[in-house]
Amino acid sequence: MATWIAHLRLAENLLKRIPNLDESQFAIGNVAPDSGIPDENWEKFNPPPEVTHFKISEGVHKNIADLKFYRQYLADVKPEDAARFSLRLGYFFHLVTDNLWSIKIGIPTTERYPQEFAADPKFIWTVKGDWYGLDFIHVRDHPDSLFWRVFLQAHPLNFDLDFLPLAAVEQQLQYIKEFYQRTDEKIQAYYTRDYSYLSQAEMDRFIAETTDTLEQVYLALWRSKINPNSHLSALQLLETIQ
């Protein structure tokens, strides 16, 4: 799945392209799906990804039925209900983004390092060192970013998704806020890390391309009002109209 700062970077870009969104609720929605409470090894979550991410297959990589969320929890919410619509739109975009992350980052990485993944079940955490290192660098280098300006002060309003407890969301929001404000030696070491698994250029390209894709999804569903029919993901929908 994409990192939390990747989701917030996308939210910040999309706030410039989609009118009349509530900044704080949109930011929260973009990280809310990751509110499953983790076990001590961060391997199992409650609620599990099948619930929070509408995941429809086994395995590490996401195969997410994001349009199922859209049909059940977003399609009937009017944009005029700004707080609720913004949070749920952010939630929906998070799911689409995680599908894209699997396609563009996750799966290619496992294919590039098959021996390492086969030999060490925890090798993914070596890889994620690059992912989160880039997050910390972005947060430190952009003091006017959405994370500092909006997200740190944000609290969920009108949160009524029946499959995800509000307490779990609030707990995870607090964790994310504290996580990226760290200033210990490990954070400083991220600036000298060799980013061999995910470079800054690759992350920036993912953000730029995914911003465009999510805007296309928004335009298709809310401007052109295209019926998603029986598609499971908005990515499938885009393939039919491009």
Image: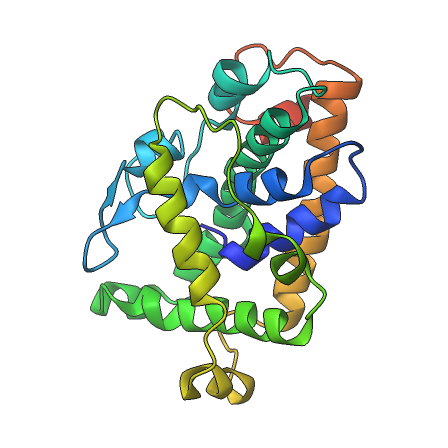
- The image shows residue 79 at horizontal and vertical percentages of 70, 21
Horizontal side of residue 25 vs 32, given as left or right: right
Where does residue 102 sit, x and y in percent of width and height?
47, 48
Residue 32 drawn at (x, y percent): 46, 41
Q: Position of residue 94 (x, y in %)?
A: 53, 40
Image-based side of 34 in relation to 66, left or right: left
Tell which of 80 and 112 is nearer to you: 80
Residue 99 visible in the displayed image:
yes
Q: Nearer the viewer, residue 39 or 106?
A: 39
Residue 83 lies left or right of residue 44; in this view the side is right
- To which quarter of the image does residue 87 belong? top right
Quadrant into which the C terminus falls: top right
Looking at the picture, does residue 212 appear above or below residue 57? below
Residue at 53% in and 32% down: 157
Q: Could you say which is closer to the camera, residue 30 or residue 124? A: 30
When the figure is inspected, residue 122 is found, relative to residue 18, above or below; the finding is below
Q: Residue at x 48, y 23 (%)?
A: 69
Question: Looking at the image, is 41 positioned above or below residue 26?
Answer: below
| Residue ID at (74%, 43%) | 15
